[in-house]
Image (spheres, rainbow, N blue to C red):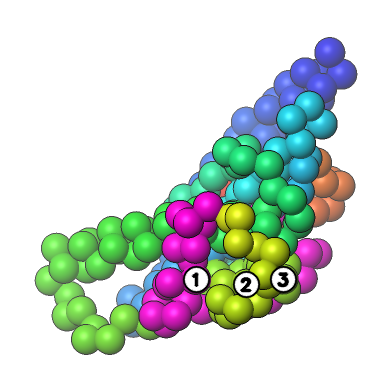
Amino acid sequence: MKALKRLLRYIRKTRDHGLHFGPYDSHSKPTLFVFSDADWAGDKDNRRSTGAYICTISDSKANSPHTTVSWSSKQQSTVALSSTEAEYMALTQACKEAMWVRRFMREIQSISEQKLPQTIPPITIFADNQGSMALAKNPEFHSRMKHIHIQQHFIREKVEKEEVRLEYLSTGDMAADLLTKALPREKVERFREYMGVLEA
């Protein structure tokens, strides 16, 4: 009942909030930025982790807020044996979504008859786990990761092909943290604003 009351209070307080898009300068090129995070073994019953990602577009990563175009918070299908493994699986899901969003953005560009660039810059994915980033960049990183399901190595392939660039972002600034665990009010409000969820 406590959790339900807390949820209802949050809904009542934020009923006038919504996603804001833009504005963007007509000469700017909106760029895709992705934030990936996982809460290792957060479910106390089955010990599965929650993986989350937020896909945003902005004309500069320094701009705040970004425009959130896609997001997900979902319990992972298998138990992760370490925080590195949980974060690595979250990176794979974030990468798959980012590839789709970028393809969709390019289709919109072609419909609007804008000239598409010949070379596509890599998508920037921010993560706060150095181990998962090292695993994605180096297939020889850790012999104890051999048990990871083959589909999770999708992220490694995209990094090798330079379609994706991984960048470290400290946990304190990781917006996707908002979708994996309960946070203090200050962080909730800061990350919510960063995502472009603002009061109308």
Task: Please tell me how crowded label 1 is: few (under 14), some (14-19), or many (20+) other residues with Cα within 10 Å.
Answer: many
Mark 2 neighbour density, 10 Å: few (under 14) some (14–19) many (20 or more): some
What residue is shown with label 2? Answer: 135
The amino acid beneath tag 3 is Gly
Q: CA distance from mark 3 to mark 2?
A: 6 Å
Kindly state the secondary structure of the residue where label 2 is placed: helix
Q: Which residue is mark 3?
A: 131
Q: Which residue is mark 1?
A: 156
Do callouts 1 and 2 mark residues in contact (Cβ within 8 Å)?
Answer: yes
Q: Which quadrant, please, contains the N terminus?
A: top right
The Cα–Cα distance between marks 1 and 2, rounded to whole angstroms, is: 8 Å
**Where, quadrant-wise, is the C terminus in this rendering?**
top right
- Predominant SS of the magenta segment: helix
Residue at x 76% of width, y 36% of height: 47
> Count the marks: how many?
3
The reply to whether dot 3 and dot 2 touch (C-beta < 8 Å) is yes
Q: Which contiguous range is marked in magenta?
A: 149-178
The first of marks 1 and 2 along the sequence is 2
